[in-house]
Image (cartoon, rainbow, N blue to C red):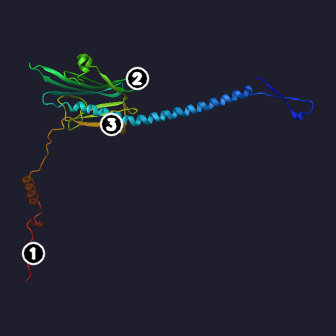
Amino acid sequence: MNAVRTYDNAAGASGTPKVCGGFSLAELLAAMTIGAMIMVSILAIYTRAERSAAAVMSRLDTPRLAQEILQRITEDLDGVISSDSDAKITIDNKFDSLLQAAKLTITRTISDSRLREQTFEEIIWQSSYDFEGFDDGLVLYRSRSGINMEDKVLDRQKDDAERAFLVPVCSGVTFFKIEAVTGKKPAEKWGGSPPPGIAVTISFAEPFKTANGTYDVFEEDKITRTIAIDRTRKIKFAVEDSGAAQSQTETKDANSPAGENMPSSEPKKTEKSE
């Protein structure tokens, strides 16, 4: 950097030169250090805000994703009951890498002209541990195979083996459980004709380790939906018989104390005073 030489008018006749230079090296280093510190602070605040926004969006999207999955399972179960098919449901629960996992198999069979049983439709929902993902969790898969094609255009070009592939639906699942509702205690294992209802529970929340070494999710973080298999079934109501109710009343009157005056069922007549 070239220095500019000037003369001080107040210096007198001697004309003492005065040299005005730029910033020194120390000043430049101090300015760069302060700028770097400001940039680091700005980046830290931005990263924290971005993480907070991602956490909030994840909280908002998680219930919606869970509801969409439960709705899709409900739609698959709605088509189980049919007049011309024999439906079977298999439910199995287990722990996969210490996480609660489950498998649901929906099978519909028909008989051909030779009375041979053929698989009309088979739908599988299952979860397994995600070994290739960065986050610890389960991957939820779905597959559909059988004679009945789900997509009449795309599935026509595929053979049975290609249509039976497990397709990943979502990842990051930390709890997935399926139970058969039979009116009593829910059953974690089921095989055979469809039960009256099926309860599906799913969660994407952070799991915690239990006393027995497995992982679980808090109850408030679980989303459960109970699905009725046959919604058109006739519900039997227990109606009390009027004759039985009358005999029960007479028995109660007979057991009452003898000295106690029972109220008469006949209306009282008012007497006229002359």
Locate residue 43, reporting x and y percent: 56, 31
User: What is the three-letter code of the residue carrying label 3?
Assistant: Ile
Q: Earlier in the sequence, mark 2 or mark 3?
A: 2
Locate residue 218, reporting x and y percent: 37, 37
Comparing labels 1 and 2, the label whose residue is closer to the camera:
2
Which of the labelled discs sits on residue 270, or is there none? Answer: 1
Of 68 and 225, nearer the camera is 68
User: What is the three-letter code of the residue carrying label 1?
Assistant: Thr
Where is mark 2, residue-wise? Answer: 133
Of 201 and 250, nearer the camera is 201
Which of the labelled discs sits on residue 223, or is there none? Answer: 3
Picture quadrant where residue 23 is located: top right
Q: Is residue 79 above or below residue 257?
A: above
User: What is the three-letter code of the residue carrying label 2?
Assistant: Gly
Horizontally, residue 61 falls left or right of residue 3, namely left
Q: Residues within 10 Å of mark 1 (few under 14, many from 20)?
A: few
Q: Distance between the residues labelled 1 and 3?
A: 67 Å
- Residue in view at x 30 percent, y 37 percent: 224
Q: Which of marks 1 and 3 is nearer the N terminus?
A: 3
Number of numbered discs visible in the structure rendering: 3
Secondary element type, mark 3: strand
Cβ–Cβ under 8 Å for marks 1 and 2: no
Q: Which of marks 1 and 2 is nearer the N terminus?
A: 2
Q: Distance between the residues labelled 2 and 3?
A: 23 Å
Q: How crowded is mark 3: few (under 14 residues within 10 Å), some or many (20 or more)?
A: some
